[in-house]
Image: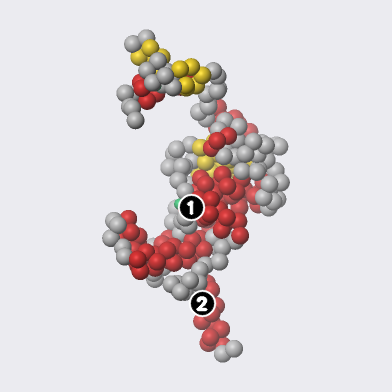
Amino acid sequence: MNPYVNVLFLLLFFLGGPVQSSGKQADFPEDFDRLVEFHGHICPGLAKGYLAVQVAQRHLQDGKASGEAITPIVEGQRCGLDAIQFLLKESSPFGNTLGNRGKGLVVLDYGKDVWIFIRDRDQKALRVVLKPGTFDHIFKTAPDADEYNTLSRKIKGKKANEQERRQFLALKKQKTAQMLLVPEDKAFNLRWLDKKDTDTLKASLPKPGKSGGRIQCVMCREEVFEQYTRVKNGRELCIPCFNELTW
Ligand SMILES: [Zn+2]
Ligand SMILES: [Zn+2]
């Protein structure tokens, strides 16, 4: 092959490949494709969560997907949370999903790209923090960043046409694929937590209420777990009735 063509291909590879609206799409790892299916769309948030799970698997599970039970504590409730649930759901005897609240996964609404992974066997815990500006080279300073951000604003403002939507999706796929290539030391600050830290952390976590018994709300007559009732004028009500919300 002509050496110039070779260099061009290499360059395109490192830039994440050209955006093509002809159907050629970025190649993702197979489990990322399945994660996208679960989440409903491709997005940078998923890539962040995916990378964080890889860190946990590398340091706490010897790289295996479900070798060791891990309890994740997630400090944000955005798209990346689905990556934690989907990829670590089998890394717990109960399932690290929101539906298993109180037994595995803990979700804190702090709005941070921070994850704590605790290995059940020895309580070894790793706090994984996304470094500020990690993806600036993809979303801020890349030659196509302006185009991406302009299209993104148009789409959010519902002003994009079909062609622009396709172009944005292609760029988003390409950029998400580039995110997945960022190495661990460039993406994250890691800190091992000692037992004192994890004990303090666990003590600070909101305690999920016990299921307890169910009672009937005196207003809507619907059943509700006892610990979710509120008392108003001596009457035990469900939360929507207490807040006078009806639908
Ligand atoms: Zn998303
Ligand atoms: Zn009610």
| Number of dots carrying numbers | 2
Dot 1: element: loop
Mark 1 CB within 8 Å of ligand 1? yes
Crowding around mark 2 (Cα neighbors within 10 Å: few <14, some 14 to 19, many 20+) is few
Q: Nearer the viewer, mark 1 or mark 2?
A: 1
Q: Which quadrant of the rendered structure holds the C terminus?
A: top left
Q: Quadrant of residue 245?
A: top left
Q: Position of residue 173 (x, y in %)?
A: 47, 63
- Residue visible at 53% across and 27% down in the picture: 208
Q: Does 224 sit above or below residue 135? A: above
Q: Residue furthest bottom?
A: 2
- Residue visible at 48% across and 17% down in the picture: 215
Q: Quadrant of residue 233?
A: top left
Q: Can see residue 204?
A: no
Residue type at mark 2 is: Leu
Q: Position of residue 38 (x, y in %)?
A: 53, 50
